[in-house]
Amino acid sequence: MSAPQGPSEHGGQTKEQTRILVIEDEKRIADFVARGLESAGYTVDSAADGAAGLELVHATDYDLIVLDLMLPDMDGLKVLEKIRNRKLSPPVLILSALGAVDDRVKGLERGADDYLGKPFSFTELLARVRALLRRGQPTPERLQVGDLILDCIRRKVTRSAEPIELAPKEFSILEYLMRNRGRALSRTMIVEHVWDMDYDGLTNIVDVYIRHLRSKVDDRWPEKLIHTVRGVGYMIETPEKQSEQEAEQQRAG
C-alpha cells in the first residue's frame, strides 16, 4: 500500500458532508484508509466487525461503505446482503485479501459496486471511491422506455404495471441501458460502468446478464425493448423508435 495523498478537491464536490463507513477488522488497514479519506476531505466512521458496522448503517445515512470480507464475527458477504436489503443502500466497495477472480465475481454478483484486492495503493482506492460517489449524484428518479418503468429510488421495475424482480447487477445494467436510451452500448462500456473496474476481459458475462434481463423484461411481451446491435453491443428502445433510427441511418448512408 502506498501512502495517502494530501487533501484535494474533486469537481467542486462538498466533501465535508460526504460520510463514508469503513468496516475493517485489521486496525492498521482501517486507520490507514480512514486517515487517507479524511485527508482527502471526507468524514469517516470505522467499525471493527460486522455487527458494529450494521449498527452504524442503521443509525446513519452513509454515502459509501468500504467493506472487508473476512470479519471476525460474520462473513462480509452476509453484511453486504443485510445492507442491500435496506430500502436505501449506499454504494459498497469491497476491500479484501480474497482477490481471485472467483471471489471478485461472487462479491460483485452479491451486490457490491466495486472490488479492490489487498494489497492496494491508496491512490487507486481514492479513485474508486470518487467514481462511486460520482455515480451517486442526483439523477432522474424514474426512467421509462415504452411501458417499462424503472424507479431509481425504490429500485423497483414494472412493465405494463406488472412488477419485475431483478438481481442487483441486472437492475444496474437495465438502469444504465435506460439512461442511455437509443444509444448502442458496448460490452466493455457496460462492464466498466456497472462493475466500475476492468473485468479481466470477461465481457462475455454481459451476454449472460442480458439473457437474464430479456427473460424477465422482454420474453413475455410481444414488443421487445432490449436489442442486440451487431458488432457493438446492446441498446434499449421501443421498436418504433428503433425503426426510425435505422431509417435515418440508411438515409444518411
Image (tube, helix red, strand yellow):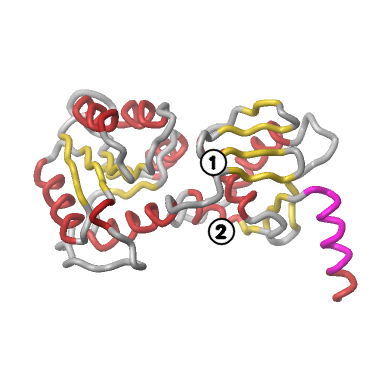
- Using the image, tell me which numbered label, if any, was put on residue 208: none
**What residue is drawn where x is 19% and y is 28%?**
52
Compared to residue 154, the image places residue 126 above or below, namely below
Quarter of the picture containing the C terminus is bottom right
Residue 199 position in % (x across, y down): 47, 53
At label 1, counting other C-alpha atoms closer than 10 Å, the crowd grade (few under 14, some 14-19, many 20 or more) is some
What's the magenta region?
238-248
Horizontal side of 25 relative to 54 (left or right) equals: left
User: Where is mark 2, residue-wise?
Assistant: 189
203 up-or-down from 167: above or below: below
In the image: residue 133, left or right of residue 195: left
Given the image, on which type of amino acid does mark 1 rest? Cys
**Among numbered discs 1 and 2, the one appearing first in the sequence:** 1
Q: Which residue is mark 1?
A: 152
Q: Is residue 224 magenta?
A: no
Q: Amino acid at mark 2?
A: Met
> In what element is the residue under mark 2?
helix
Residue 134 on image: x %, y %: 41, 57
Secondary structure of residue under mark 1: loop
Gap between marks 1 and 2 measured at Cα? 20 Å
9 relative to 96, above or below: below
Residue 102 occupies which quadrant of the picture? top left
The residue positioned 54% from the left and 43% from the top of the image is 172
Indicate whether residue 242 is drawn in magenta.
Answer: yes
